[in-house]
Each structure stands twice: as structure tokens, then as C-alpha cells.
Image: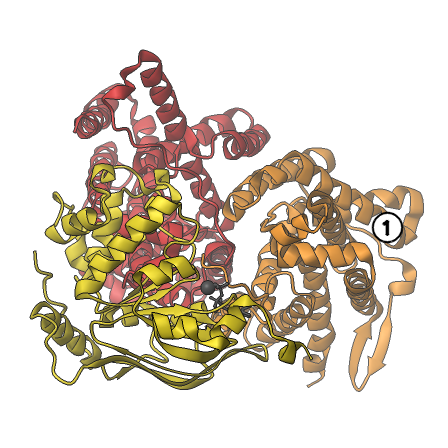
Amino acid sequence: MSEPPVRGAGRAEERAEAAMSEAETAGRAEAGARELLEIRGLQVVFDGFRAIDGVDLTVRQGELRFLIGPNGAGKTTLIDVITGLTRPSAGSVRFAGTELVGRKEHRIVRLGIGRTFQTSVVFEELTVVENLDLAATFRRPLWALLRRRRGVSDTVAEALETVGLTDLAERPAGVLSHGQRQWLEIGMLIAQRPRLLLLDEPVAGMSRQERERTGELLTTIAEDHTVVVVEHDMEFLRRYASQVTVLHEGRVLVEGDVAQVRADPRVQEVYLGRTAEEAA
Amino acid sequence: MESLLNQLPIGLSIGAVLLLIALGLTFTFGQMGVINMAHGEFIMAGAYTAYMLQDWAGAQAAAVALPVAFALAGTMGWVLERTAIRHFYGRPLDTLLLTWGVSLVLQQAARDLFGAPNVQVVAPSWLNGGVTIGGGTLPYNRLFIMALAIACVAGIWAYQNRSAQGRRMRAVMQNRELAACSGVATARVDQLTFFIGSGLAGVAGVALTLIGPVGPSIGTYYIVDAFLVVVAGGLGQLRGAVIAALALGMLNSFAEFWTNASLAKVIVFAAIIVFLQFRPQGMFVLRSRALT
Amino acid sequence: MSERVRGYALFATVALLLLVVAPLALPAFRLDELAKYLCLAIAALGIGLAWGQGGMLTLGQGVFFGLGGYAMGMYLKLHDAGGDLPDFMVWSGVERLPALWQPFGNPVVALAAVVLVPVAVAVLLGALVFRRRVRGAYFAILSQALAAAFVILLVGQQGLTGGTNGLTNFYDFFGRDPEAESTQRTMYFVVAGVLGVLYLLARQLVGSRFGRLLVAVRDGEDRVRFLGYDPALVKTVTFAISAGMAGLAGALFVPVVGIISPSLLGVVPSLELVVAVAVGGRYALAGAILGAVVMNYAKTSFSEEWAGGWLYLQGALFILVMTLAPKGAVGLYQQARDALARRRGASAAAVEKPGVAVKEEVPA
Ligand SMILES: Nc1ncnc2c1ncn2[C@@H]1O[C@H](COP(=O)(O)OP(=O)(O)OP(=O)(O)O)[C@@H](O)[C@H]1O
Ligand SMILES: [Mg+2]
């Protein structure tokens, strides 16, 4: 089921949005959009503390990018800035050529960026299907939501299948286990049909099996989406990552493929403790 | 011009009363997320304390009543916290409705005990008269209320910043879980905060007897404005409460002077809505990263 | 599915009771009282929508009720005056009809204003407040302050609003004598009909995707943003709908009771209505209606017997409900039903909806 078009008339932003979602359904074949996300000179300051201190980052269309770094490196903050939750003190974030800084959260989502949260947040009183359906229908105008949902739309069914929650579809999300919630969140993300997915520590707190399933899920999703994953887990990284960016104390430390990054002495330094020279 | 000058002490003393009331509210609200509608009835309890003490202390009743009212209202608050409110933490809106039920009962009890009509408390003679400054008069009773508010704010400030117990209070306010993990007995801190906050309402009640009559529903006149002070000042913020209370008191009295009493409230309300456009969480905010 | 059938059966039963049994069984003045409760139930329905479903604790519904009531009252007053000044204006020495009153001479304008004015005020307030993410307790306090200010304004503007007395002494209600028994009877059916229609519409709303969205906004406003929705819009719309319902309720109240005055609209009456909703069961629309009717009935009958006692009783009942049964009567009923079903061991088949949990809210 293809999404109905967005309100036709109105602000330029919404028209751009409509154009974009059309382009998306047309097979993500925009010319010149090789660089999907461009972050330049980003700075975030919290009460004098520089959580992000001059980050440049480029994510290309179709890429699966891992973002790693020790606690407090600024990974979540970076995602917060991209999605409009936190306002940077300097720098720019461009998404497919559109500046995101200063836009409201829901507007950014409407441009085609979806995210999950480090601690998953789903709507416990809605069923799994309802959660997904909510995620799938945001492009419709409000009055179109006044009808009852009849059955399960293709988008939702597909998302259910992808994250493997079909059996739990009619249960309230409140009864899900931690891992299942994370999957539901990922499912909601898929149902949103975004052009860029930002996942904040999707496997944190998961069991080994759950991790593996999530890894496979991630690989599937990455086939036809652009994905940025924040992750701590080195093992997970080794198995599923290709391109990695290492953040440390608000800066990009290293960027490259997994082997390169793992071999880099600076990375070992920040992950395995400080060296003598720093302690001095 | 003269009468304009006279508005100043009126505004300041209304602000002072609002401050006394709002102090307790802002801490119970900020620390425990409790919206205590029965706070107004603690004011009433304080006011009736002064009234009752007249038999015994005569014209000095208001002065004698201050500590008694503090203890009485504080105890009432403590009992309320122990018996009911502590089951409601994390459900602020429900505490609002719960405490409104309590407030109904207390008001009716006062009506049965003291009668429905207003009563008068005779102010101590040393509060009669006033000083004249630049054409305006500063009545002593209003000066006294301001001094009382200053004393209470200073006391709270010292308590929060200088005493170990007060620091615990601030810790709980900033992060309850963390404070609990760090060994702070949060339940005890809550009780004490409630006691002090409610006690201050009692003090405010005594102060109100100096500028007007006392009735069973005296609290309801002030509680709404006091909550506005909390909203405008920011939760649990001493500075915010002081500034917001004075601003609201002044705005109220000047708006009344320039227009009339019935428009003044609307003006104050509009002013607060406008203010919240710039500071949606009040003047000062305790930061938190939590996604609600 | 059977859940749904049961719902319709219940609705039909209640409709039968209200539309057939009550008019036959009740004496005229009792029916009139019931009409009054049903008016309040319409306003309560709006509260159930805004608060129970949307999490907006609105303590100022009296304002919208009043705006609707005054719009209706102003029209009736002007109609009675027949081109002259309404009686109370003459008494307060007003010489020319205030500009504010002029449009209300037209019944169409007045009837439209009954809904549109409350909606406009709610949209304005909602846009200002929700857009800035003022919510939870802050919103409750602001709405209460609005009610306080509104009443003080009404009382103070004697010449414009009739002051404390409000608007009363209506002699002609669309060509009928408002006091006549037949008019009262007709009004009863009108009120019951409006309530029924609004209830069905509200149910439809709650069951729709918008309703799901509303619950999501209630439970996680910030998360909803990241699903691409604007919670401020959702809340403003819902708040406006509830305001419109209150306005309509106020307008119907005027011919039924024959008066609209500040004492019906202030902080306390507004809170009382919220209380009624809580007692009935805030998470179910039917609970809101039930609560409003029962609580107001109890208030009337008790106040007839022992005025002070009602306040004790109301206060105590309220403390008990909030402590022991925060989901109200409907919640208790659901609990009992579930317990019974479990005992029968019939739970295997039923994919039952668990009762709505009382959510932890985060202040502001
Ligand atoms: N709202 C805020 N106020 C103050 N400091 C903040 C705020 N948000 C983040 N910080 C600080 O910024 C730094 C970066 O935080 P961030 O959450 O982005 O780290 P992270 O890389 O996601 O860490 P983790 O791996 O623990 O999730 C931390 O030191 C954090 O304490
Ligand atoms: Mg993080």
C-alpha cells in the first residue's frame, strides 16, 4: 500500500516533503544526493561543557555507518542534534541539501529521518499493530486519521514480519520484553519509511541470541536503507559493521572500515584506558 | 501620583503573602511533584490560629500565633503527607484532585467549627500607623508582612544551602533516584519538606489576618495565584518564587489601580501566558535529559 | 467483537431508559433536574476526552460552559427586550447596547457562537500553551487560573454581564414559554439526544487512529514527535473539541435551568465536574457521563437534606476514589468483570484488553 500524498498545497517545506516521498517511492533514485547527511563544524555546549566539539561527518546514500566511542563521547548528543532534540551552538546539519538546525522534531521526521532511543520508548497501552500503524500514517493529514483502522496495512504487515512480531501483533506493547520492545521500535522506524535511520544502541541490554537476531535485522534493513547505528559492543561491531566513525570527547577520532579502526592505536587507547603519556 | 505610590506597598505586601504561600508549594511541587490544593486550607488554619489565640494573647495574638500556626499547619501537612499523599508520588495530577477533596473537608470543618461568616483578628497596636515616604504611606502592618517574608526566605535559603538536611532536600529535588541510591532517606526528606512548606502556609495565614478578615474559604482566594507564582518562577526555585511573587503582586495591584479589579486578573493571566511563551518552564529550570 | 456488541447493547439500554422510561416515570420537575444533569454530562464528556484520553487535566471547563451559556443567554435577553435594552442593563444604568452584545441579537450568530467562541478561546489558549510544551500540572494550573479570572471578570462587569446574578428571567425561548412543562419536556429530549449523538461521535473519535494518536500523546508526547506528528496540534484539536462540547452544554443549560451565572462556572464548579469524571471513570467516556449524572444527583439530593454533609461526603468520596479506585466506577466494574471471568476460567479464549493503567506522569 503506497502512502497517500501529503497535503498538496501549503508551505514550501511540505511540498518539498511530498516531492521527496514521491522520489522515495520512485526508488530512491535522486540524482546528486550521494551525500545524504552532511554535518559540518558541529558544536554543542551544555552549561559550558563541550559535548560536541567541531564534528564533521558525511553519510552517503545507502551506507551503513557505525558510530562508536566511549561513554560520554557525544554519540547520543549527535543524534539528538540531527533529529532536532538538541540545538547546536554552532555548525550545520544538512539532509539531502536541507538545513535541519532550527527545525522542529516532527518536521525533521517528515523530511525522512527516523530514530530510536537508547532506552526504548513504545506506547504501552497501544497494541503492537497500533504502535506500528501510528508510525506508518504520519504523512496523512490529521482529518484522514478520523477513520477507524480497518485491518493491517501492507506497510505495517511488512514491518511486523521484518522484526518478527507478527505473533504478538494484537498484544499491548506493555507486555513485550526488553528485546521485543527494541524490535518494535525498529519496526516503527521501518514503518515510517524514512530515508535515514538512526539507531541508538539497539542491542544494549539484549541477550546473545537477541543480539544476533538484531544483527541480522540490521543487515536486512541496511540493504535498502541508509542507516547510522550507535553501538558500544565491539563484538557486534566486528560482525556487522563496515564503515565506522569513532567519536571521542566530542570529536571524530578516526573514520574508516572496521579493520582500520580496530588497528588504530588511538582507538585502542581510548577503549583500553589512557596511556602513560596522558596520565603524566 | 500619590495613590500610585500607595500601590507600591500594597503590591509588595501582596507579593510577600503570595511568596509565603508559594514557597511551600514550589518545594512540595518541585521535590515531590505534589500539587497540594489543601495548601490553601493550611493558610486558613494559620489564620484561625491567630483568631483563637486572641482569647488568650489579646491584641498580641498575631505575633504569638506565628510559631503556633507554623507548627499547626506544618503538622497538618505532615499528616496529609503520611496518610495520603505518599501513595501518589509520580501522579501529580491525581494529587491535585486528592488534595482538593481534603480541602473541601477542611473548609467545611472550619465552617462547622467557627461558623461561615468572616471573623476579624485585631492587629497588635504596634502595627497601627505607618511611615510616610515621599508622599506615600507605608503602613506598618504591610511592612511587617514584608519583613516576615524576607525572614522566611532567608531562613529557607540558609536551610537549603547551609544545613546538611537542606542539601539533602536539594539533592532529592534534582534527582530522587540518585539521592536515594546515595543513602539519602528520601521519605524523611519528603516529610520534612512537607512540614516546612505547610508551616509556611500557616505563617502566611497569620499574615493575612493583618490585612483582612478571616473566613473558611480564605485559602481559595490565594491558592490559584500562588500556583501561578510557582509556574512562573520555575519548580522548586527559591529565586524564581521570590521574583515571580513580587512581580505578580505588583502587577496585580498596579493593574487594579489602572483598570479595575475584575480586569486585573485577566491582565495577570495574559501576562503569564505571554511570559511562558519565552520561558515555558518558568524563570529558572532544573535541567534534565529525560524524555518524558 | 462481542465487546463491541455489548457496547451497543448497553448504549441501547441507556437510550431506552433515558428516552422512554425516564419521561414516563419521572415527575416533571425531576425530569427537569435530569435534563440539567445531562447538560453537565455533555461537558463531562468533553473532559473525559481531553483528560482521560488526552491527558490534559482541564480545570477550566467552566469557562467554555459559561461562554456557551452566555452566548445563548445574551440572545434570549435581547430577544425578550425586543429592541430595547435588557432589563439588568437598565438597572445598572447602561444607556446603549454594548458593541459586544450587538451580534447576539441574531439567533443564527448566537447559536454559532455557542460552539465557535469556546472553540476559538480553546484554540488560542491551546496554541499558545501546547506549542510551548507547557503541559501536565502547569496546564492544569493555568486552566484553573483562567476559570478564576473569567469569573472575576464576569462579576466585575455588571453592566455587560449581569454581574453576580448572571443572565436570567427569560420569557421566550424560540417562541415557547421556557417555564412551560411542554417546553421543559422537549428540552429534555433535545439534551438527551445531543448527549447521545456527541457520545457516539466521541466514541468514534476515540476508536479512530486519531484516538490512538491521542493516547500516544498522553503517554509519551515527546516520543510522538519522533513519529512525525505535532503533539501540540493533536492536543489543541482535542482541547477545542472538549471546549465546544462544554459550550454546547452551557447553551442547553440556559433554557433547562433558566439561568447562567458566574457561580456556576468558577474554579469550584469546574473542579466538581472533573471530580465527577474521576468518580465515574476517567478512561471511559461512559464513565464521564455516569459520574456527572450520579454526582450531581447525589449533590442535589444531599444538599436538600443536609447541606454541609454533602461537602464532607464529596470530599471523603473523592479521597477514597483517588486512593482506592483511581479508574473510578467503570474501572471497578472492569476489575470485577475480569476477576469473574478469570474465576470462570474463561480467560483462555479472551484476548482481553487489560484495564488502562494509571500512568506515571512527569511534571511539566
Ligand atoms: N542535556 C545535557 N545537559 C548537560 N550535559 C549533557 C546533556 N546531554 C549530554 N550531556 C553530556 O554530554 C556528554 C555526551 O553525552 P552523550 O549522551 O552524547 O554520550 P554518549 O556518547 O551517547 O554516551 P553513552 O555511550 O553513555 O550513551 C556527556 O558527558 C553528557 O553528560
Ligand atoms: Mg548514548
Along the viewing direction, whichever of C173 and B97 lies nearer the viewer: B97
Chain A's colour is yellow
Q: Residue at x 29, y 27 (%)?
A: C28
Along the viewing direction, whichever of C145 and A267 lies nearer the viewer: A267
Residue C58's x, y, as percent? 42, 52
Kind of residue at disc 1: Pro
Residue C162's x, y, as percent? 43, 57
Q: Is residue C116 left or right of residue B210?
A: left
Whether C253 is drawn above or below B283: the answer is above
Q: Where on the picture, by quarter, is residue C3?
A: top left
The kind of secondary structure element at disc 1 is helix
Along the viewing direction, whichever of C182 and B62 lies nearer the viewer: B62
Q: Is residue A7 left or right of residue A57?
A: left
Chain C's colour is red
Q: Where on the picture, by quarter, is residue C273?
A: top left
Residue B227's x, y, as percent? 59, 58
Whether C99 is drawn above or below B178: the answer is below
Give the image's coloring scheme.
by chain
Chain label for disc 1: B
Q: Quadrant of the N terminus of chain C?
A: top left
Q: Is residue C315 left or right of residue C210?
A: right
Q: Residue at x 54, y 30 (%)?
A: C320
Chain in orange in the render? B
Whether A73 is drawn above or below A162: the answer is below
Instruction: For ligand 1, tell me if the residue under mark 1 lies within 8 Å.
Output: no
- Give the crowd class for mark 1: few <14, some 14-19, many >=20 residues within 10 Å: some
Residue to which mark 1 is pinned = B67
Task: Let me know if residue C174 appears in the view.
Answer: no
Q: Is residue C18 left or right of residue B111?
A: left
Q: Residue at x 37, y 37 (%)?
A: C356
Residue A196's x, y, as percent? 25, 69
Q: How many marks?
A: 1
